[in-house]
Amino acid sequence: MRSYVPNTEKERMEMLADIGMSSMDELFKDIPADLKLDRPLDLPEPMSEMELRDLIRGFVYMNEEGGPLFRGAGAYRHYIPSVIPQLVMRSEFYTAYTPYQAEMSQGMLQSLFEYQTVICRLTGLDAANASVYDGATAAAEAMLMLRDNKRKKKILYSAALNPDVITVMHTYGHCAGLELVEIPVTDKGVSDIEAIRSNMEGAAGYIGANPNYYGNLEPMDEIAEAVHAANGLLVAYVNPITLGVIKRPADYGADIAIGDGQPLGIPLSFGGPYVGFMAATKKLMRNLPGRIAGETRDAEGNRVFVLTLQAREQHIRREMASSNICSNQMLCAIMASMYCCVMGPNGMREVAEQNIAKAHLLADKLTRIEGVKLRWPETPFFNEFVIDVDNAAEISKALENYSITGGLVLKDGGMLWCATETNSVDEFDFVCDIIQDTIDSMGGDE
């Protein structure tokens, strides 16, 4: 309501007169008649500002934030330190957009530079760009990087990537004329390395996730060896929270690291907006899409920031552009930077360790229930895991009755569960009690 500025009928007529018009219909005469509403809007009588605020507040109270959340599948509820939403409310941040007059936007360029620095330190790679829309977009853009660098149109990808990411990759791949080859998942819940080796001939590279969609940790050292042995490039899709405890992409030889920055201090927000991150080796830096903010010195020796690389079609010839992305997801990138800086290395490690510990405790408690089994009991996992249980849909519905979002019901009937530092042992016990009661009641019906 801050920007609500009313005007009277007399004032509207005076404004119309200033531009040589006599009515609102004349102002909108270029709109075809069949597109105009020929009746009054179905709205109640006008309200005072106070009445309108009360009405909107009532709608807000109707929204249910829900109870415990045990679902990840690409978007995760993590604790966000209160300093982050407080700082990001500053108008310098939430009004920033693409730097069309770049060097006039020193504050924004420095923010992007710091974000890139954080991503490089998390992944261990040499260069990062100033963000893309989300993790799926990052995967699609990485696919094009493979094509451009190796001059090959065959791309391998893991079936254990997030299904939504795979869908976006196929959309991009279809338009780019790429040949996408899916690598199956083994009975251990990870990508089939032998299938990677046998399909690498003529391929530009391989895109896989660690941890994968099912939460399982992939043997990335072996995968990197298989890909590089065929002169291909390895793209690692990673959850940034995991990098507090497990190997960084650079440490097992990844050429490109991508992912969604949502776990880094960005709320779920009903699905977005989020921020995709991309980092690469120095050799591949010029293939990165979007832009790279860099640091230099001005004529007086002051530290200043510039756009070092601009690879989108608004800046260079269209046929030379590596991307047409125009937004830099500035606000989300800043939130991710703030989160990493507030948490620091020790905080990032603690969060990751809590995710591992709580997910394994939840898995242990669930599998104590008769009829519930961990699908891949011998495979290490991070904060997600799959259980097999009869009537998963009924269990999910029973949990919803208590405002609990349980594991995601998979197409094959399994359930993909997630636990983060925001979940408690009491919640685990409550969920297990509900599941036990649900299974008992279904057994009783038989």
Image (spheres, rainbow, N blue to C red):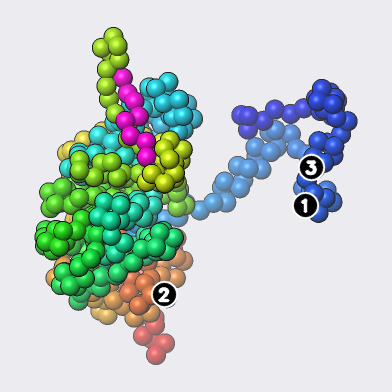
Mark seen at residue 35 = 1
Tell me what residue is drawn at x 69 percent, y 38 percent: 52
Give whichever of 396, 37 is nearer the camera: 37
Of the two numbered discs 3 and 1 in the rendering, the one whose residue sits closer to the viewer: 3
The reply to whether dot 2 and dot 3 touch (C-beta < 8 Å) is no
Question: Does residue 228 appear anywhere in the picture?
Answer: yes
Across and down, in percent, residue 30 comes to 79, 42
Q: Residues within 10 Å of mark 1 (few under 14, many from 20)?
A: few
Against 388, residue 108 (above or below) is: above
Name the residue tied to disc 3.
30
Tell me what residue is drawn at x 23 percent, y 59 percent: 205
Question: Does residue 377 appear anywhere in the picture?
Answer: no
The mark nearer the N terminus, 3 or 1, is 3
Q: How crowded is mark 3: few (under 14 residues within 10 Å), some or many (20 or more)?
A: few
For residue 351, side relative to residue 110 (left or right): left
Give whichever of 444, 324 is nearer the camera: 324
Tell me what residue is drawn at x 25 percent, y 34 percent: 117
